[in-house]
């Protein structure tokens, strides 16, 4: 399968159209100007409207909704069912970014298109990059896995996030201990009147994450599942709960793996008696079918991004349970939490 064109090239080619659409509102109302920013300080939102939050991908939106509730209007740039690897923003995404009080992205090379889009829109919202959060302790990318997206990958202070695994939201403990406090601090800075509401929601959500962690530890009790995956999305989950990730089919998402890579993957999986292949709703890979047939592997649908249209994957804890049960119950293993 040929590699997709550079996203920076796509954005460059449509920038004039997007800018015109923004100016004209594409037949709708003109977008309000974002609040002014003074230096590094974030200006509180006007009290007569909801905070406008733009997130690059759905898991970030899920987390903000848990904490902000009706005090924030949350817009996700990546549409449901789309892949961040091949995303080409539409004019509506540019208009959303231009109105934002706060923009959240994962960072690294995962969603560099969000930063490029923000630059095109000319807005100056508060920005949060998950991979740069204090205390997150991100993992390195597995093997040569690289999402290949354009965009600035430098962390504050000049460090580069390009070599980091972006899928940090798939570890509920990192979410609890590093992500939630940072999101609450940003919400309070933008909307001081909501301080008590945000902190109460954060405490409730932390308790929910504690319960989720206990469930996952029970589900993944020995013998730990061993699995192959379509791409390297599951390193954080595997590291947290002692799972055995044996390898990935597509080292670079969307690029057909070499026969040599597939042969090595099959050998490694047979050596460890791996008979589980994780596939995803946004990726359809002929190579995955080849590997599954060569191993006689069971395939299980997992979803790192979630989908607000599907109840089992519509919020953060439901998404994590969906994925954990798909892995833990493969090969005849039974769920141990009584559900």
Image (cartoon, rainbow, N blue to C red):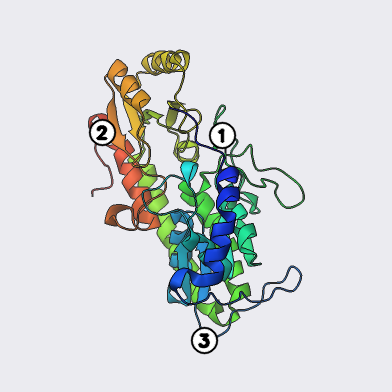
| Label pair 2/1, CB-CB below 8 angstroms | no
Query: Is residue 153 shown left or right of residue 86?
Result: right
Q: Position of residue 120 (x, y in %)?
A: 62, 59
In which quadrant will I find the N terminus? Answer: top left
The disc placed on residue 48 is: 3
Image quarter for residue 333?
Answer: top left
- Residue at image position (32%, 47%) is 322
Query: Is residue 158 shown left or right of residue 101?
Result: right
Say above or below: 63 vs 47: above
Mark 2 falls on what kind of element? Answer: loop
Q: Position of residue 43 (x, y in %)?
A: 66, 76
Q: Which residue is mark 1?
A: 146
Disc 3 vs disc 2: which is toward the camera?
3
Tell which of 212 and 97 is nearer to you.
Answer: 97
Query: Is residue 119 shown left or right of residue 283?
Result: right
Residue 160 seen from this side: yes
The alpha-carbon separation of the residues under discs 2 and 1 comes to 32 Å
């Amino acid at each position: 399968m040929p590699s997709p064109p550079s996203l920076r090239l796509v954005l460059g080619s449509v920038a004039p159209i997007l800018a015109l659409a923004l100016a004209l509102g594409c037949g709708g109302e003109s977008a309000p100007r974002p609040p002014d920013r003074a230096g590094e300080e974030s200006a509180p939102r006007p009290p007569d409207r909801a905070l406008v939050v733009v997130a690059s991908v759905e898991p970030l939106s899920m987390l903000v909704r848990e904490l902000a509730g009706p005090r924030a209007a949350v817009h996700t740039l990546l549409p449901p069912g789309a892949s961040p690897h091949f995303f080409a923003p539409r004019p509506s995404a540019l208009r959303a970014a231009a109105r934002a009080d706060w923009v959240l992205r994962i960072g690294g090379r995962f969603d560099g298109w969000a930063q490029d889009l923000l630059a095109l829109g000319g807005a100056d919202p508060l920005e949060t990059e998950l991979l740069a959060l204090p205390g997150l302790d991100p993992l390195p990318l597995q093997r040569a896995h690289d999402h290949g997206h354009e965009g600035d990958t430098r962390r504050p202070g000049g460090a580069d996030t390009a070599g980091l695994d972006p899928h940090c939201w798939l570890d509920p403990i990192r979410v609890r201990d590093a992500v939630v406090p940072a999101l609450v601090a940003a919400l309070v800075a933008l909307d001081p009147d909501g301080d008590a509401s945000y902190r109460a929601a954060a405490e409730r959500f932390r308790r929910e994450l504690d319960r989720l962690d206990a469930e996952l530890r029970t589900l993944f009790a020995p013998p730990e599942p061993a699995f192959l995956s379509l791409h390297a999305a599951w390193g954080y989950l595997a590291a947290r709960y002692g799972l055995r990730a044996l390898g990935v089919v597509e080292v670079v998402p969307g690029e057909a793996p070499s026969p040599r890579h597939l042969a090595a993957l099959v050998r490694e999986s047979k050596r460890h008696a791996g008979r589980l292949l994780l596939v995803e709703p946004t990726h359809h890979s002929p190579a995955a079918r080849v590997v599954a047939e060569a191993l006689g592997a069971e395939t299980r649908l997992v979803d790192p991004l979630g989908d607000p249209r599907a109840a089992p994957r519509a919020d953060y804890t439901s998404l994590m349970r969906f994925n954990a049960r798909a892995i833990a119950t493969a090969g005849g293993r039974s769920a141990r939490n009584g559900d």
